[in-house]
Structures are given as C-alpha cells and as structure tokens.
Image (spheres, rainbow, N blue to C red):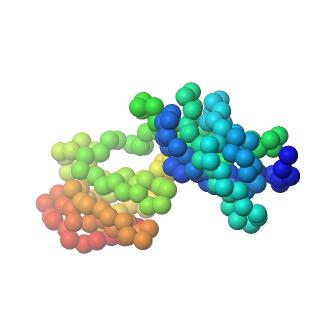
Amino acid sequence: MEVLGDPSVDYFSPGLGDAGDTILVIGQNFSKTAKNNVVKFGLADAAAFQCTAHPAPAADSLKVVVPAGASSAPLRLKVYSKQAISKDTFYVTTGKWIKRASLPGCGRFNGVAFAVCDKGYVGLGTGDGISPANERNDLWEYDPTADTWTQKANYPNGTLKKCTSFVINGKAYVGFGTQTTLSYLNNYSL
C-alpha cells in the first residue's frame, strides 16, 4: 500500500454535470492507482478511471464519471482510509429547476443583469414595466454559494431602464439606457 499524506480536493471542473459526465478533480495525495480514489457525489460513489499522481508540491489529478443517483453536494474524496471534502459544491443537473433565493423587492422589466467573477448582479429597470413612478435605480448582488442577495450602491445617475451591460477584466459597465423621456449615453462602471 502507498504511504500518502492527507488528501485534499483543491478544485474540480466542471462545477456541474449529470450522470455519465466526466469530472476532473485536482488536489493532493491521490493514489497512483485510479480505483483507490473514490469520489462521493452526495450518497453515490464513483471510482476514478484515470489518475495522475505527482510528488508534492505538484497537484494530482483524477477523472471520474458522475454516477447515477448523484446529488448536489461538496465532493468527498476517499483515498484508502483518508478523506477530503471540497470547499465548493458540485451541482447535479437533472433537468429540474432548483428553487433559489428570490430577488428582494419587486420583479423587473427592462432591467440589467451581468456577472463578475462568481457573483451575479441584477438591477435598474421598472417594477411594473409601465409607470415611471416604479422605475428603479437599485443594484443587487447574488452570491450562489450562500444563496443570498445583498443590496449594493444605487446607480449614481438616477433611474435607468432598457440599458446594456458588459464586463471586461472583472469590471462591469452599464449604460446606453433611457430615463423616463431622456436617452443616456453615459457609462457607469462597478
């Protein structure tokens, strides 16, 4: 039997998949023999079918197929009698929607949405799609790991709807929308 330190799961890719999909797991202290590395997807076990183990500090990698019966949970890796748990959750895509936290306040029409790093953002627009009195200048950040919404600073130029957004190098830009009767070409970055 190999003499290994405590295993670790540093990350895996992709972060979601369905039964039959192949996942790459990166970490430390994997067995050189693929079948000795067992990955648990919720309650379902899957033995790795390919493993590349390196002397520390180089990372080890293994490939595993998502088993039938897998459920969304952090991955658990068992190497002989030692175990490691991933910090991130692996999400099983079963073709079914999973209820997540709702955006606080009212719904949106003609708002803006974008993602920066691992967070999603939604804001601006109108609450009912018609009335200028319901136009919004708020911005909300969604954290999928915590399943929570946090209100961010309001859009500095008042309300805005029918705008656009794009992200470059981790920075979001919002603009080119309308405000009741005015059209704006001003940009705002987050």
Residue 45 in the image, given as x and y percentages of width and height = 65, 33
Q: Is residue 102 above or below residue 174?
A: above
Q: Is residue 136 visible?
A: yes
Q: Count the marks: how many?
A: 0
Position of the C terminus by quadrant: bottom left
Nearer-the-camera pick, 7 or 133: 7
Q: Residue furthest toward the left?
A: 181
Q: Is residue 88 visible?
A: no
Residue found 17% across the figure and 57% down from its top: 180
The quarter holding residue 104 reads top left
Q: Image height check: is 166 above or below 5?
A: below
Residue at (57, 32) in percent of width and height: 67
Horizontally, residue 85 falls left or right of residue 163, namely right
Q: Is residue 90 above or below residue 178?
A: above
User: What residue is drawn where x is 49% and y is 56%?
Assistant: 118
Identify the residue at horizontal 71%, vertical 56% (top origin): 53
- The percent coordinates of residue 131 (x first, y second) are 19, 46
Q: Is residue 124 left or right of residue 58?
A: left
* 43, 160: nearer the viewer: 43
Q: Quick one: which residue is furthest to the top in this view?
A: 69
The residue closer to the viewer here, 61 or 85, is 61
- Location of residue 4 with respect to 48 vertically, above or below: below
Say whether residue 5 is left or right of residue 117: right
Point out residue 47 in the picture as x, y percentages from the top left corner: 66, 38
Residue 130, image quadrant:
top left
